[in-house]
Image: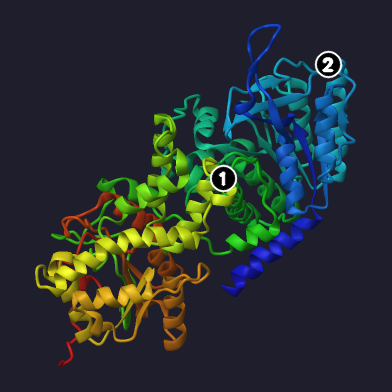
Amino acid sequence: MTNEIDWLGDCLERIKGARIAIVGDFCLDAYWFIDPSEDEKSVETGLPIRRVRSQRYTPGGAGNAAANFAALGVAKVTAIGVVGRDVFGAELCRVLEERSIDTSAIYRDQPDWQTCVYSKPCIDDQEQNRLDFGAFNTPSEATVAHIIAALRAAAETHDAIIVNQQIARPLCNGPVVAAINEIARKHPALPIIVDTRDMASDFEHVSLKINAAEAARVLTGEADQGATLSLSRVRDLAAGLQKRTGRPAFITRGDRGLVVADGRDVIEIPGIAVPPPIDIVGAGDTTLAALASVLAVDRSPEAPALAARVANIASTVVIKKLHVTGTASPEEILAVGPNPDYIYHPEIASDLRAAKYVDGTEVEIVNPLPENLAIRHAIFDHDGTLSTLREGWEKIMEPMMVKAILGSAFQTASEELYERVTNECREFIDRTTGIQTLVQMQGLVELVRRFGCVPEDQILDHFGYKRIYNDQLLEMVRERVAKLDRGELAPEDFQIKNAHELLRQLHARGVTLYLASGTDVDDVIVEAKAMGYAHLFGDRIYGAVGDVNVEAKKMVLERIIRENNLSGAELMTFGDGPVEIRETRKRGGIAVGIASDEVRRFGLNPSKRKRLIRAGADVVVPDFGQLPALLSVLELSSRTPALV
């Protein structure tokens, strides 16, 4: 872990010496926030008037890529582009200079050039029909000459050159592309990275940062924009691009990460799990900036893969910044890295046909287990892994969140708004299953604020929303516990198949058991006692303690490993949520995913299986019904049970 931290910190420190030149379509993003309550009709035309309450201007297109370099703290960022003699051109240069970006190479002397502007009227934070300026520009001979001269000068004074195309009629036309190709031939050691929408095939001897569909189009002339290309296909494409250009190639795959071909090997950089809400606008520019910054200061053979790792982490910072084309600072990148929540085996997770089972069983082996396992400690998640006392919590959380977001407009909101809020809440719950409730409520606060239906002074904090949710949930759980106490129901009625028997078997074989939950610890203890297995855990029952900064499952794993001086293969975790699986994977333990159907209490839940594999599960089972086979896989069946 220390070496990883040193690696990332050292890399981010070194890029501060980089000098980057970026050429392309510099644009201005104009946000005009309309107050619909102030609408009236024009006396002259009779048409509705839209009144703008506030406005915001930020660099867009190549300007946003330049802003990302500035945010990373590189020594010098030079913008090579064109703006018009209009108010937008002056504003674009101002917002660039505000970020310490050198605009001296921006050409301002083509009289008919319109500054490229993406104007975005917004009502209630929802973007309306966009108005674009500059879509019909054609660079003059003088403009092209200026751009080429600036590029040639940059090749002598900068550590990397970036090409960024954004619009259909780009600044980088035929003569400019030819000049870039010439510079690339004359300066083979100079990193030149091209990020274009539809011109990648025009460039030679450069590194391409490109998505998978566009890579397929460049190499084969065919691409299906809606298709998710397999990893093996993307690896072949990356190798093909690298061979074609002679420079490292980078293919982005959305939440599946990146694939890098460096001329020696093809390397997969896994995607990183980021819970909703997210906004992917600007993530590509951040990826480009991080790639180029690292390559500018590191010419080693390992640099392309290193750059991709940094870019992968940096992009996760940006997608958490909502309704803004964001950037990532070194401090923000360090807060995510160096060991983020990677997404594992997305192809296997998404396709049940790819599952590999132990013969004659439903025990799925995702990763080969190490030989000679010696499991001494086992951590269990509670809800959904052992107990179903809280089954149906999603049906309580979802309407509670919807009501919190809509506030007083709950009954009057349009069908479209109600459906949009409901769908977003459902997705959020699905992707955050397994983390402590307090963190989920933090996400709810963000959603309430983002939708804007509730006045700021009426928005509760995460503790307030948790109280509302817990009151509703505990009403259901306490009724179920009361039925257990009265003998109307038995623990088996709220138990994943064979869960209690597994606990007994492990305990009898000398495995020390721990119970870890995102639920409040006092409630976990009460429920474990009602289920009849609390005594098998002793005082090793852990839960949330009211501190959003304390993740119970992380805390338990760290404490067990530290206090018992364990190696990874001595530790095993059983869980139906991604948190405990990821944390175990990071610490080298064995992660057993329980893809349980909490309604039937046996059988496979395909959605859980997908989440668990993506989180890094080594083994996946639907329940503990095939206990002998599971114990055999974990090399526990031959261990002699103790006399108890």
Residue, x 43% and y 40% (percent of image)? 421
Residue, x 29% and y 86% (percent of image)? 538
The residue at which mark 1 appears reads as 455
Residue at the extreme bottom: 643
Foreground residue among 44 and 312: 44
Q: Earlier in the sequence, mark 1 or mark 2?
A: 2
Q: Quadrant of residue 468?
A: bottom left
Residue 485 position (above or below residue 357) = below
The secondary structure type at the circle numbered 2 is loop
From the image, state whether disc 1 or disc 2 is nearer to you: 1
Q: Report x, y in % for residue 375.
A: 31, 80
**Residue 424 can be seen in this image:** yes
Foreground residue among 484 and 100: 484
Residue 139 position (above or below residue 371) = above
The residue at which mark 2 appears reads as 140
Q: Quadrant of residue 59?
A: top right
Q: Amino acid at mark 2?
A: Ser
Q: Report x, y in % for residue 220.
A: 49, 27
Residue 171 position (above or below residue 192) = above
Foreground residue among 611 and 638: 611
Residue, x 74% and y 43% (percent of image)? 67
Q: Report x, y in % for residue 41.
A: 64, 14
Whole-number angstrom distance, CA of label 1 to CA of label 2:
52 Å
Image quadrant for the C terminus?
bottom left
**Residue 148 can be seen in this image:** no
Foreground residue among 376 and 517: 517
Q: Report x, y in % for residue 621.
A: 23, 61
Direction from residue 291 to residue 374 in the image, left or right: left
Q: For label 1, count other residues whose C-alpha is less than 10 Å away and answer few (under 14), some (14-19) or many (20+).
A: few
Image quadrant for the N terminus?
bottom right
Q: Amino acid at mark 1?
A: Pro
Residue at the extreme top: 45
